[in-house]
Image: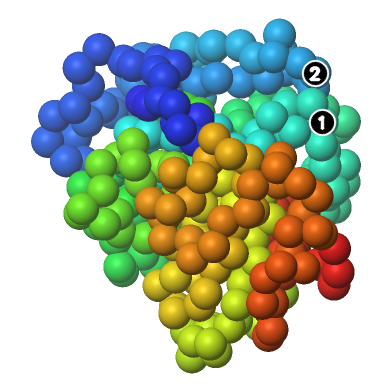
C-alpha cells in the first residue's frame, strides 16, 4: 500500500506478496484468524503524530449495506484534513454523523483509521451493487465520518467510488479524488461556474500551488477560463506547466498592489485554505 503526501510518495506498509487473481487476493476463510484481521495505521486518541500506531490486528471491514463495496487498498494519500482529524478537528460533529442517536459511549470511534483518498481493486460487492464487480480498478473519496484508507481494506458506498482512469497509476489516482471534489464543490456549488459559463471568465486562484489549487487550475483551463494563479516564486514553473495564463508571486510585492496592474473584469475570486476552497468577496 502506498501513501501519497501530495508531491512526495512514501511507503507506510506493504504486506508481502498478497496479490493473486482478482477477487482472491486474501483467500479469506472464517476459520483462519489471519484472514479476519488486517494491518492499518490507527489512532487511539487525538493528539500529535505520536498517537499514530501501526496495528497488524485491525478487524477486516464488512459490508453493512447492500450499496457498499470492499476495496483492497493499493494507494492512499495524506490530506490536511487527516492531520487535523488526528488532532481532534471536527470530532464532535463527526461523532454525531457516526452515532446520531447517541447510543455509543464517548471515544467509541477509536481505534480510528484516518485517510480519505484511495485507489485499489474491488474485492466484494453488496447485493444491490450493479456497476462494479470484484477485480475492478477503482478510486474513491471516503467521507470523514467513516473508517479511512490507511489500511489494507476499506468499505465505501458506490456513490463514493468510480472506475480508475486507465491512464493513471494507483499512486497517481490516489492523489486526486479529495482535492478534485473539493475544487469542484467550490467552483460549481459556491461560485456557480460550469463548462458552459467559463469561456470569457477570468478566475483568480489564491494559494494556487496547493493540492486544491492545482486541481482548480486544471479544471478551469479545461473549461476555457482565463486563470490567474497566486503563489510563491518557487512554484511559478509548476503553475506554467498546469496552464495558468497569468502568475502572481505574492512574495515580490503586496498582492493588492499587483492586482491593480491587471485586468480583472468579470473575475471570479477564490482562495484555498488548507484542503478547502473558499470564494472571497474582496481582497
Q: Residues within 10 Å of mark 2 (few under 14, many from 20)?
A: some
**Of 237 and 181, which appears nearest the observer?**
237
- Image coordinates of residue 56 in percent, x first then y, are 47, 12
Image coordinates of residue 68 in percent, x first then y, are: 45, 55
Task: Name the residue nearer the viewer: 92 or 177.
Answer: 177
The spot of residue 249 in percent (x, y) is 64, 47
Q: Foreground residue, 18 or 261?
A: 261
Residue indicated by mark 1:
88
Tell me where residue 277 sits by quadrant. Answer: bottom right
Quarter of the image where one finds residue 30: top left
Viewed as shown, does residue 136 lie left or right of 204?
left
Q: Is residue 91 above or below residue 200?
A: above
Image quarter where the N terminus lies is top left
Tag 2–tag 1 contact (CB < 8 Å): yes
Q: Is residue 204 above or below residue 118?
A: below
Give the secondary structure at mark 1: loop
In the image, what residue occupies the spot 54% across and 35% down?
A: 234
Q: How is the image coloured?
A: rainbow
On the image, the x and y values in percent for residue 238 come to 45, 45
Separation of marks 2 and 1 at Cα, in angstroms:
7 Å
In the image, farthest residue toward the front: 261
Q: Which mark is residue 47?
A: 2
Category of crowding for the residue at label 1, using alpha-carbon neighbours closer than 10 angstroms: few (below 14), some (14–19), many (at least 20): some
Amino acid at each position: 500500500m502506498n501513501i501519497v503526501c501530495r508531491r512526495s510518495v512514501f511507503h507506510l506498509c506493504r504486506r508481502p506478496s498478497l496479490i493473486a487473481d482478482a477477487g482472491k487476493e486474501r483467500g479469506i476463510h472464517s476459520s483462519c484468524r489471519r484472514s479476519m484481521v488486517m494491518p492499518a495505521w490507527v489512532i487511539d486518541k487525538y493528539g500529535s503524530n505520536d498517537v499514530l500506531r501501526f496495528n497488524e490486528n485491525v478487524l477486516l471491514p464488512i459490508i453493512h449495506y447492500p450499496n457498499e463495496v470492499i476495496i483492497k487498498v493499493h494507494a492512499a494519500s495524506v490530506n490536511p484534513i487527516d492531520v487535523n482529524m488526528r488532532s481532534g478537528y471536527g470530532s464532535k460533529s463527526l461523532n454525531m454523523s457516526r452515532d446520531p442517536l447517541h447510543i455509543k459511549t464517548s471515544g467509541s470511534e477509536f481505534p480510528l483509521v484516518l485517510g480519505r483518498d484511495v485507489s485499489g481493486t474491488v474485492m466484494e460487492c453488496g447485493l444491490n451493487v450493479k456497476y462494479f464487480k470484484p477485480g475492478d480498478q477503482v478510486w474513491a473519496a471516503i467521507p470523514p465520518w467513516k473508517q479511512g484508507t490507511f489500511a489494507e481494506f476499506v468499505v465505501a458506498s458506490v456513490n463514493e467510488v468510480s472506475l480508475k482512469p486507465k491512464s493513471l497509476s494507483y499512486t497517481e489516482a490516489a492523489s486526486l479524488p479529495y482535492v478534485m471534489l473539493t475544487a469542484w464543490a467550490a467552483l460549481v456549488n459556491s461560485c456557480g461556474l460550469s463548462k458552459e459559463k467559463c469561456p470569457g471568465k477570468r478566475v483568480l486562484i489564491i494559494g494556487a500551488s496547493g493540492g486544491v489549487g492545482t486541481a482548480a487550475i486544471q479544471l478551469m483551463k479545461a473549461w476555457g477560463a482565463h486563470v490567474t494563479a497566486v503563489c510563491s516564486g518557487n512554484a511559478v514553473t509548476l503553475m506554467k506547466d498546469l496552464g495558468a495564463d497569468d502568475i502572481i508571486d505574492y512574495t515580490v510585492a503586496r498582492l493588492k498592489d499587483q492586482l491593480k496592474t491587471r485586468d480583472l473584469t468579470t473575475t471570479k475570486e477564490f482562495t484555498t485554505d488548507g484542503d478547502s476552497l473558499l470564494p472571497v468577496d474582496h481582497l
